[in-house]
Image: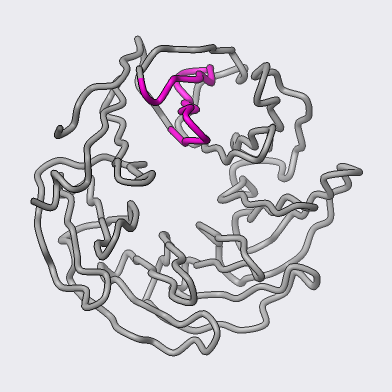
Amino acid sequence: MFRKPLVEFATPILRCKKAGDVLFIIQGKEIAKVDAETGSVIQSNAVFPEDNRTRDLVIDEDVIYCEDFYRLHKVDLATLEVVQTWALGSDLRSDVCSVGFDDCKIYASIRNGAFAVIDKASYEVKNYPVSQTSIWEMIISDYIYAGNVAGEFLVIDKELIAVVNSKAVHRKNLKSLLLEGDIIYTASQDLSIAKTNIKTLDTILVKKHCHRKMFYLAGIWENYLMTVSPPCNEMKIWDKNELTLIKEISGGTWGAFNDGDLLYEFIDNKIVCSRIADLVD
């Protein structure tokens, strides 16, 4: 099975995430639920008042948090109805760059390095200056692990909402992260992959010239790390330990991710999936 079509919509797919056996898809003004096994559309609802291509979503236990310019929407997972909207900025100079959450709080990085922290129980929003440059992506664990425009890997204390450790891992735009145990893999616009120990911030390994143009980390499966470069129209599979190239595959779009032994991609109006074992062979 290689890039088997799963579902097709009438309009292009913007984002896709998976929770359990269900894919949650942003396409047009709607969020749709799709059965990940059969590809059948379970439910869809118009969530957004207008079209744009800057949205993303993360899935909590029973809600979805959707980035929408400078707004953040809380959407009920069962009904796909918007139950709360926060205006975290005022225009595109203060839009939401990334979102994460834990049991008690929602964390949103705002362009130019600010953080908005929302209490899940009270909906209270507090704002903090965190980074001198925009934070593109974050992973929530014991700390908040993030990367910024300057290429720094940041360790942010969740109570203080302040950087407690940092390292200039890349030269610019650290835009993609994957955490596995005590190791974080990062990818940058400087076209390199780095492996860093999150406890010591020691650099374990750096691989340069991974693609000719911008790329991101799509996932880890067994001993393999997958990267995708849409501008190059290519996907690469690496040995995650040595960062040696195993295989190069034609094709690749933004937003691909693995779940278990399957890789999900959205290509124009379609979601396609592949067995990663077939890609490696």
- Residue at 20% across / 69% down in the picture? 239
181 is within the stretch colored magenta: no
- Residue at 70% across / 59% down in the picture? 115
Which residue is nearer to you in this view: 26 or 34? 34
Q: Is residue 176 above or below residue 19?
A: below
Farthest residue to the right: give it: 122
- Residue at 64% across / 33% down in the picture? 64
Judge from the rendering whether residue 240 lies leftward or rightward of residue 184; answer left or right. left
Which residue is nearer to you in this view: 197 or 150? 197
Residue 49 location in percent, x, y?
A: 62, 17
Q: Is residue 230 above or below residue 84?
A: below
Residue 281 location in percent, x, y?
A: 8, 51
Which residue is nearer to you in this view: 41 or 31? 41
Which residue is nearer to you in this view: 221 or 99? 221
* Residues in magenta, as a range: 16-37
Tell me the quarter of the picture where residue 156 sits: bottom right
- Residue at 13% across / 44% down in the picture? 278
Judge from the rendering whether residue 62 lies leftward or rightward of residue 150; answer left or right. right
Q: Quadrant of the N terminus?
A: top left
Total count of labels: 0
Residue 272 location in percent, x, y?
A: 26, 28
Query: How is this picture coloured?
Result: one colour
